[in-house]
Image: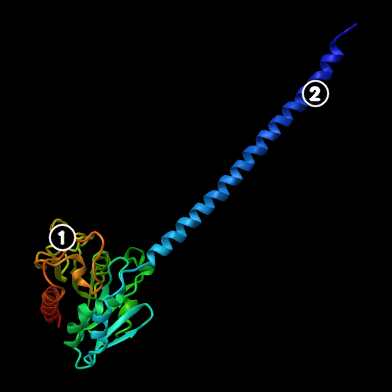
Amino acid sequence: MSTAPRSDRRGPTRRRRLLRIVSWVLAVLLVLVLVFLVWAHIVVLVLVLVFLVWAHIVLQGTPSAALTVWRDDRVSVRDAGDAVVMTPTGIADGVGIVFVPGAKVDPYTYMATFRQVVADGTTVVITKPTLNLAFFDRRPLARFEAHAPDVRTWAVGGHSLGGVRACQLAEDRDVAGLLLLGSYCADDRSDSDLDVLSVSGSRDGLSTPEDVAAARDLLPASATMTEVAGADHAAFGAYGAQPGDLPATVSRRESGRAITAAVESWVRDLR
């Protein structure tokens, strides 16, 4: 008598059980991987949707300030789709400014900032940044210049994050000037022949006086640095208070006059 046949019969049975176990383990792992991938896609989708909603919630302009611009017969305003174009109804001085808004700030809020400058003869093209964030906007300067073909001398400018983007656009050889409102450069423009005006607020809680001073060496030595005493970050647009900012110690009217005077003087040098 021999036990070999019984051992031979147990061997295939054990292998079949082992294969079943391995198959079940692999099936469970596959299900877990699929569930993980589905949930990962859902999480990514939710995050994208949340970001898009967040990006489209912008700081709205003050209605009374906007109405003042619309009612000013010295200024013409039109929506060009990708920009708000402000042109003088009187004699134009041949100067144009492509201006980039701050992050998540309605472009129309800057109409009040440039009302008097435009009335004086300068054209201002206020861009509508991609996703309301200048960081994502990689459209060329020429796209916005095309909205005002009669302009002979172009400058670029921006507020806050928009100013950082303006510094990048200032690399264009045709740009004569750079305007920074509550902002500073991240790119080195110190060797350029740009006519630069930087207007900041002593009460700016976002682009702080220390931030502006730290980035001063990225601008030409000839740059005009103007600090408006008591002005906060939101003083450069008509949209009310902004989270993270410091309270201003001067009225919007007073800081607005100082900002306008500085910009008007800068524009005169560009003519």
- Is the residue marked by circle 2 packed among few (<14), some (14-19), or many (20+) residues within 10 Å? few
Look at the numbered discs 1 and 2 and tell me whether their residues touch, using CB distance below 8 Å.
no
- The amino acid beneath tag 2 is Thr
- The image quarter in which residue 117 lies: bottom left
- Which quadrant of the rendered structure holds the C terminus? bottom left
Per the image, label 1 sits on a secondary structure element best described as: helix
Describe the element under mark 2 as helix, strand or loop.
Answer: helix
Front-most of residues 139 and 264: 264
Look at the image and tell me whether residue 138 can be seen.
no
Res 121 → quadrant: bottom left
Q: Tell me if residue 220 comes above or below residue 5 in the rendering.
A: below
Question: Residue at image x 21%, y 80%?
Answer: 114
Position of residue 190 in the picture relative to residue 10 (left or right) = left
Residue beneath disc 1: 212
**Residue with the mark numbered 2:** 13
Which circle's residue, 1 or 2, is located before the other in the chain? 2
Residue at mark 1 to residue at mark 2: CA–CA distance: 79 Å
Residue 244, horizontal then vertical, whole percent: 24, 59
- In terms of depth relative to the viewer, which is nearer, 187 or 130? 130
The amino acid pointed to by label 1 is: Val
**Image x and y of residue 35, in percent:** 59, 46
Q: Left or right: where does residue 190 sit relative to residue 169?
A: left
